[in-house]
Image (cartoon, coloured by chain):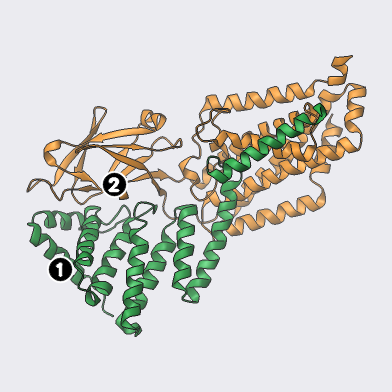
Amino acid sequence: MLNLSTAVFRQLLAWPILLSGALWLALAYNLSFDEDLGAASLGAFLSYIVLALSALILRFGYVLQQRRQQGWLRQDSLRRTTGRAVISETAAAICSLLLLVVCSQLIVLTLNPRLNVQSESHHIVMSRVESDNSWAFNWDDSIPVGSKLCLTFDFENSPKGVIKSSITAEQRSAPVTAGEIFYWTLSADNVRDRTITLEAPAEHNISLIRPIARLVIERPPISALPRLLLNQLLFFFTVIALCLFIFRRLKVNGNLASMGALAISSLTNLKGGNLLPDVGALVACGLRFERTALTTNNIALFTWLAMGAILIYVSCKNLVANKK
Amino acid sequence: MTRHLPSIFVSLIIAFCVVSVANGNLRAVGQDSVDSFRCFNMWLDFNSASVEANYLMMGVIADQIEDLSGNSEARELSAYMAGYSTSAESYKRIEHDALYWAETGVKWLRSSDSTRNNPFAGLLLAAYIYAERISPRSSSLLTREQMLKTYAVWLASGGGSDSVNHYSATRYQDYLALDREGRDNYILGQLQQTWAPE
């Protein structure tokens, strides 16, 4: 099985592919952390790694199709070695993804680039007026626990001399001072419910300046990179399993199977649909990645991984042998 | 026909995903990556446009950068260049042209107050453009109203979340202590004090 895995691995990561991967990593590092042009953001770097991992999945589909054309699948079914072949292919695919992830981790942790100087980032939050002195806020995606609301209150119509007030929600209260930004740290319940309503004493007659209400989310530090990359690897484990299932069980062309696996895994981000576990945040990347990164809950993660394991198990079954 | 059913099914799922991405109901894996790369390219275009002093192009690209990444730096820089720095008298611009670009710069800032990630610096810039570049050339009451309102919002925010000026809260409290007319004069006085010498 080790020999088979090595053979698939070498087929997956042929020299031109390895060279392209190394060049891509160098490019990704420069595009993300270049002092003049880079965004100096881990999210930008992660986004190029996600692209490389997706490209590897497509390559995996191509290699599977090549193996079918070479007659390996027929041999597997005749020798009843389908199970071993599937596990070898899975291992080879995971190792190739792991190699990329480890290299990207090493490049960043060794060169230790300068990240964006601001440790927190501002994000838009939807707000609405509930009554004259209360406001409701809500957001679409899961955000990290410890995120804060950053609010500005207008004391323009308050009674003379009132420069301090208080904001309350769910038996919690915090003082607010005129001319100072007010921060409200969201509790785990608020983050889970994706909504919160804040209230001010009616007699103070303060109002929220809604257009400049924001969410403040802490940016993951560079030390969080191993965990962020591991999350990507966990996400792509089930994508590999999906690809193998479509290819082996549904007998679809390898290239189409890999595209299908990527498409199906994208459905985790479908708005208003709960077809698949909510694991889209595992591959959070881009310039606003901190909004969702590291927010996947354990139940969704384990469901996703269990799905992958089941798909691999089902793919291991030798269909021809079963029929006999 | 039944042999091809799985392939047709997978193709349909791919097609559904493509349509959902186009409708904005779905973020495909890697879509943020593509946006990140597009953003990098837009910054290159933005730099070229700023070198060529093509303000209209700067405004358009800044809009796209903000849409993709929420980053408001390009928006603020284009409004500053088009509506503030090059509209100064020392720049010897035609009066009408200077007023047009100052108004455009303010329009860019005001239209994105609720969509910029960090709106605070833009509020102050808008107030300065109103005070130093538009008000001397236009006697519109609406302009004056907008200027006072924008600066009052900035005062209420204490200079924003990154502000290092600890006097901002005191200034807003001083402002609140005055009556309606006094408040307007207080803002005008504050803006005159901070006018940069040209």
Left or right: B107 as drawn, with respect to A319: left
Please tell me the numbered disc located at residue A210: 2
Disc 2 marks a residue whose amino acid type is: Arg
Residue B72 shows in the view? yes
The x and y percentages for residue B28 are 59, 42
The x and y percentages for residue A43 are 53, 48
For image coordinates 50% across by 29% down, the residue present is A297
Q: Residue furthest top?
A: A324
As helix, strand or loop, the secondary structure at mark 1 comes to: helix
Q: Mark 1 or mark 2: which is in front?
A: 2
Chain whose colour in the figure is green: B
Disc 1 marks a residue whose amino acid type is: Gly
Q: CA distance from mark 1 to mark 2?
A: 27 Å
For image coordinates 50% across by 67% down, the residue present is B46
Q: Quadrant of the image for the C terminus of chain A?
A: top right
Characterize the local packing of mark 1: few (<14), some (14-19) or many (20 or more) Cα atoms within 10 angstroms. Answer: few
Characterize the local packing of mark 2: few (<14), some (14-19) or many (20 or more) Cα atoms within 10 angstroms. Answer: some
Q: Quadrant of the image for the N terminus of chain A?
A: top right
Q: Is residue A2 above or below residue A158?
A: above
The residue that label 1 is drawn on is B189
